[in-house]
Image (cartoon, rainbow, N blue to C red):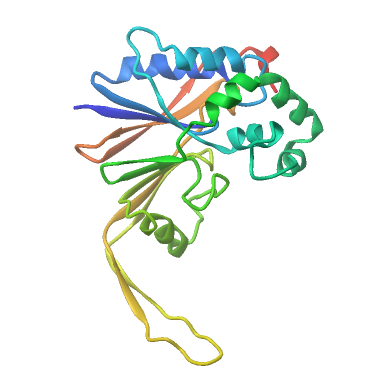
Amino acid sequence: MSQWAILSGIEGNLAAYDAVMNDIKRQVRELEAVYILGDLVGPRPECEELVKRVRSPKNNEIEPQICTGWWEEQCFILHGIGTQGEPTELKSRYGGDTVVKLWNSVTKKTVEWLRYFDFGFFELDCLLIHGSTVSVDDALTPETPPIIMLDRLLRDGANNLFCGRYGQTFEYCIETGSLSTSVTTLDAQNSPQTIKTTPRRVVGVGNVGRTPGEATYTLYNPTTNRVEFRSIRYHFNKGFQP
């Protein structure tokens, strides 16, 4: 049975990516696709080496399909091709040193390549995306209210939403039911509308490169709808720590 390998948050960590690809080869007999849901790059000195590795897969590897993540958006801002003029969010979260590290880790040539990434993928009844259709920074978590989860699923009619922004593995299921909504204005209250829901699911796919020495990712079988979370340990060179 063919499976998908779904990764996110490599963040320029070459050792983590190699470890995950080797684990996929050991675990999966029939691999149909590899998806990287954003944050391929990050403020690491081996980032360009990782990009070369991803763009030139080994003979027995499938070329990954990649969509835009939060770190890619920061690269666009730094190089003046984003929707914002200054890396305000990057500075506030990680400080000025990380801004310099990211600038030095990702070349202009790579940024031009990143520009052509998709925002997400819709395959079968599955939406695969870094955050959500709202934004790349929209972090869906196990604590997200059901009404918000349902909104994110209904926006594109997906039964399964795979996302990577939160950085943890989780499975959030919405069962069959109905939801009544109404809008009240100063003039009047509109008649309630009832939305019927079918079983749907949001899956956090984990994070490959953020935690030194430990990587998590997800295997998905579209035939059986089965999700398997994988957590692996690997040798980490502390010299590469951002």
Q: Quadrant of residue 63?
A: top left
Q: Where does the image place residue 160, in percent across and percent down from the top left?
A: 33, 47
Tell me the residue at 70%/12% (across/down): 239
Q: Quadrant of residue 59?
A: top left
Tell me the residue at 32%/9% (across/down): 60
Tell me if I can see residue 15 in this picture. no
Q: In this orientation, which residue lies closer to the viewer: 7 or 168?
A: 7
Q: Residue furthest right?
A: 96
Is 85 situated left or right of 234 in this image?
right
Residue 77 against residue 175 in the figure, above or below: above
Residue 34 against residue 222 in the figure, above or below: above
Number of disc labels: 0
Tell me if I can see residue 50 in this picture. yes
Q: Where does the image place residue 37, in percent across and percent down from the top left?
A: 46, 34
Tell me the residue at 31%/30% (across/down): 4
Residue 44 against residue 141 in the figure, above or below: above
Q: In this orientation, which residue lies closer to the viewer: 190 or 76?
A: 76
Is 106 situated left or right of 192 in this image?
right
Position of the C terminus, as image quadrant, is top right
Q: Where does the image place residue 200, in percent across and percent down from the top left?
A: 31, 54
Q: Residue furthest bottom?
A: 187
Residue 239 against residue 187 in the figure, above or below: above
Tell me the residue at 43%/80% (across/down): 182
Q: Where does the image place residue 139, in percent across and percent down from the top left?
A: 54, 48
